[in-house]
Amino acid sequence: MFYLLAKLFWVVAQPLSIIALLMLIGIVLFAVGRRRLGFAAHAGALAVLVLCGFTSIGVLLIRPLEERFTRPSPMPESIDAIIVLGGSTLARVSTARGVAELNDAGDRLTDAVVLARRYPEARIVFSGGAGLLEPGGEPEAATAERLLLAMGIAPGRLVLEDQSRNTDENADLTAALLGDDTGTALLVTSAFHMPRSVGLFRRDGLEVIAWPTDYRSSGQERFGFDLANPVHNLNTVSIAMKEWIGMAVYHWTGRIDSILPAQTSN
């Protein structure tokens, strides 16, 4: 139920949906003769569009998340497990064409390959099921397996968790799969996603070493107009909003003990 409610909430709460709803409300208000209110609704839609699509607000929202955790320095001498979270592939395309088509978070998988070669004895634990609301898609673990095998990773090193649909289930099912035999583990996921992920793995008794990847900000941006790529800007705002809201809800429901989990010394 939590998974379904979260998906439905985000259909309405993302910036493009808010813009569309304000436009629709404005049209209805104009139709019933409430012209001032209709104009206000359309002005609100335009304000959201300009703020989210044509300014740097997105990177400013996502940057605190991305800077919460850093990669280990120096690198550990040995690693027993490299845990990779799903969310890095295009499910419909990968399933239909039998390929491993990567999305903007594809660094999760490419970094996993790099780390697998650096630590040739480590197990590669991939966590990701079929997260699409409609049936018929293959689990993301199957897609990832296809890519990892093609990149030369030995089948015996792979541990696949293919039932999880969100980060909460990633942590629960991975912890159950590994049991007490985790050893020293790296957690690979997008930098903006790392605070919530680490908080959930800690809840399940796994003190992982963060390996953030898939950065969306340089850490040097200031607020201002950014006209080069409004679609990218809207996407960044959506990702940041979803993550901040997700952490607040997870903290409120007791899934993580802090609204913004922090790094500890390794």
Image (spheres, rainbow, N blue to C red):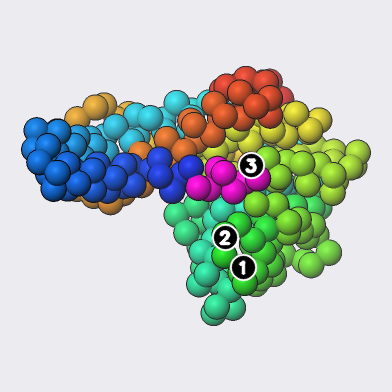
Q: Residue 71: image x %, image y %? A: 59, 34
Q: Residues within 10 Å of mark 2 (few under 14, many from 20)?
A: some
Q: Is residue 113 above or below residue 138?
A: above
SS under mark 2:
loop
Q: Is residue 167 visible?
A: no
Mark 3 vs mark 2: which is more N-terminal? 3
Q: Quadrant of residue 135?
A: bottom right
For image coordinates 57% across by 65% down, the residue present is 134
Amino acid type at circle 3 is Phe
Q: Is residue 254 magenta?
A: no
How far apart marks 2 and 1 lie (CA) works out to 7 Å
Q: Are marks 3 and 2 in contact (CB under 8 Å)?
A: no
Residue indicated by mark 1: 135
Q: Is residue 182 left or right of residue 25?
A: right
Residue under circle 3?
A: 2
Circle 2 sits on which residue? Answer: 132
Q: Which residues are magenta?
A: 1-8
Identified by mark 2, the residue type is: Leu
Kindly tell me whether residue 92 is visible in this rendering: yes
